[in-house]
Image (spheres, helix red, strand yellow):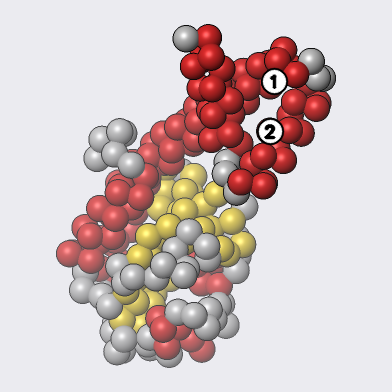
């Protein structure tokens, strides 16, 4: 996987690969972000949960696996495991079998892969070892993709900040107002027009460029 591949595409490739080597009815990939595990990819479509569902370390089987860095395999009645966490919006809560494996990068947990089966399924040592190995191999790739995503987001924030500063300077000069007043003007326009600060700032800078043109 190339570092330039978008983060969610990397995770989609992980799901595709894992589900091709071990038969399962569900596959989730959680990524550790701060002290929370965030659901970032799923074999089955879950737009209401992906990027929204979060677990604390130690919460549910998934959180336990992340905290202890050990796989957990439950062949039947997974929901009766005392560590299990219910999420009413997910039909997978009713699945019988559950395999959860940590994603590791340089000995550090970066996420968790969960496989589930509708019917009872005894995960073999080979399957557990195979997914654990996958977790070890792709952990570094996922960490790299996450860092690339964070770097891109930081660059975007810096670009927006520079744009807003430029727009503030234009308003201060043209309207003879303070920096705070210029910022509040941009903020009010953003709220009133339901546009981002970036878009409002771009409009101000573009308008100024046209006038200077």
Q: Residue at x 33, y 42 (%)?
A: 6
| Tag 1–tag 2 contact (CB < 8 Å) | yes
Q: Residues within 10 Å of mark 1 (few under 14, many from 20)?
A: many
For mark 2, what is the residue? 186
Q: Tell me the SS state at disc 2.
A: helix
Q: Residue at x 31, y 34 (%)?
A: 3
**Vertical position of residue 27 compared to residue 179: above or below:** below
**Vertical position of residue 124 compared to residue 150: above or below:** below
In the rendered image, residue 61, in percent from the top left (x then y), is placed at 51, 72
Residue 18 occupies which quadrant of the picture? bottom left
Ranked by sequence position, the earlier of labels 1 and 2 is 1
In the rendered image, residue 190, in percent from the top left (x then y), is placed at 64, 41
**Vertical position of residue 45 compared to residue 120: above or below:** above
Q: Residues within 10 Å of mark 2 (few under 14, many from 20)?
A: many
Q: Tell me the SS state at disc 1.
A: helix
In the rendered image, residue 100, in percent from the top left (x then y), is placed at 41, 68
Q: Is residue 100 visible?
A: no
Quarter in which the N terminus is drawn: top left
For mark 1, what is the residue? 171
Pick whichever, 180 or 155, lies toward us.
180
Pick whichever, 90 or 34, lies toward us.
90
Gap in angstroms between the C-alphas marked 1 and 2? 9 Å
Pick whichever, 199 or 38, lies toward us.
199
In the rendered image, residue 147, in percent from the top left (x then y), is placed at 45, 35
Residue 188 located left or right of residue 28: right
Q: Disc number at residue 106?
A: none
Please identify the residue farthest to the left as the structure is shown.
20
Q: Residue at x 38, y 39 (%)?
A: 145
Q: Residue at x 17, y 64 (%)?
A: 20
């Amino acid at each position: 996987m190339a570092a330039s591949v978008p983060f969610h595409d990397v995770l989609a490739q992980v799901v595709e690969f894992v589900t091709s080597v071990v038969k399962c009815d569900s596959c989730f990939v959680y990524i550790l972000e701060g002290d929370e595990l965030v659901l970032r990819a799923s074999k089955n479509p879950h737009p209401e949960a992906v990027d929204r569902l979060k677990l604390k370390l130690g919460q549910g089987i998934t959180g336990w696996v992340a905290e202890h860095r050990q796989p957990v395999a439950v062949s039947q009645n997974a929901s009766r495991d005392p560590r299990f966490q219910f999420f009413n919006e997910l039909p997978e809560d009713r699945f019988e079998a559950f395999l959860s494996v940590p994603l590791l990068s340089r000995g550090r947990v970066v996420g968790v892969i969960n496989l589930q089966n509708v019917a009872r399924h005894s995960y073999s040592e080979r399957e557990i070892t195979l997914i654990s190995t996958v977790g070890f191999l792709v952990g570094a790739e996922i960490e790299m993709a996450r860092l690339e995503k964070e770097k891109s987001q930081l660059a975007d924030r810096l670009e927006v900040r520079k744009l807003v500063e430029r727009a503030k300077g234009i308003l201060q000069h043209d309207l003879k107002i303070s920096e705070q007043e210029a910022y509040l003007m941009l903020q009010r326009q953003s709220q009133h027009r339901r546009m981002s600060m970036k878009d409002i700032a771009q409009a101000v800078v573009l308008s100024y460029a046209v006038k200077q043109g």
